[in-house]
Image: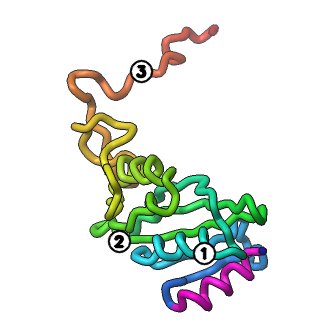
């Protein structure tokens, strides 16, 4: 099923919970996607998995993105049954970055949601163990955010170093 038909199916089933659908026919769109209201992304994802004509049984990834105004999670889905892909986007305000967890739909979401939490500060309601994944538990801030400022050190260890190429003399 192509993205236009998927968009029409989701729009027909979920109405105003589907905000936007960009397809290959839209000018400049290289990776077609469907934007979903943040609070409905779990329901839409579950439907995409269990609806026979969609059967998006594989969650390839959830990626965080900071647009400056919102935090967006991008869900890449795949159907082994039909061989099609689907990209869903769910945006939330930066000051209320909360989405429903998709772990009950795709168990692999556990790790992807922890990564989005760790790097962007998105909280996933209903997640079975939301905690940092990549950074230490006492790390301050979320380095994926555009306004993140890295401190000069962490626990006495410098967070930056000289460029080793600067140590080479002019002749190489």
Of the two numbered discs 2 and 1 in the rendering, the one whose residue sits closer to the viewer: 1
Residue 162 marker = 3
The reply to whether callout 2 and callout 1 are in contact (CB within 8 Å) is: no
Return the x and y of residue 26 as percentages of the image width and height.
73, 79
Judging by the rendered image, the residue that carries numbered circle 1 is 34
Of the two numbered discs 2 and 3 in the rendering, the one whose residue sits closer to the viewer: 2
148 left or right, relative to 46: left
Q: State the SS at label 3.
A: loop
Q: Earlier in the sequence, mark 1 or mark 3?
A: 1
Q: Which residues are magenta?
A: 2-15
- Magenta stretch containing residue 80, yes or no? no
Q: How is the image coloured?
A: rainbow
Whether residue 68 is visible to the viewer of this picture, yes or no, is no
Residue 99 marker = none
Badge 2: few (under 14), some or many (20 or more) residues near its Cα, within 10 Å? some
Q: Earlier in the sequence, mark 2 or mark 3?
A: 2
Residue appearing at x 62%, y 57% in the figure: 58
């Amino acid at each position: 099923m192509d993205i236009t038909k998927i968009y029409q199916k989701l729009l027909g089933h979920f109405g105003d919970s589907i905000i936007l659908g960009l397809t290959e026919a839209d000018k400049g769109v290289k990776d077609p996607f469907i934007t979903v209201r943040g609070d409905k992304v779990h329901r839409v994802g579950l439907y995409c998995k269990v609806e026979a004509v969609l059967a998006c049984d594989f969650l390839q990834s959830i990626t965080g993105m900071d647009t400056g105004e919102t935090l967006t999670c991008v869900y890449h889905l795949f159907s082994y049954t039909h061989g099609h892909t689907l990209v869903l986007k769910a945006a939330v305000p930066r000051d209320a970055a909360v989405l429903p967890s998709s772990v009950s739909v795709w168990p692999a979401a556990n790790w992807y949601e922890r990564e989005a939490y760790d790097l962007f500060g998105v909280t996933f309601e209903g997640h079975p163990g939301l905690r940092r994944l990549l950074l230490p538990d006492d790390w301050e801030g979320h380095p994926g955010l555009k306004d993140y400022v890295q401190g000069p050190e962490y626990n006495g260890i410098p967070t930056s170093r000289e460029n080793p190429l600067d140590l080479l003399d002019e002749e190489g």
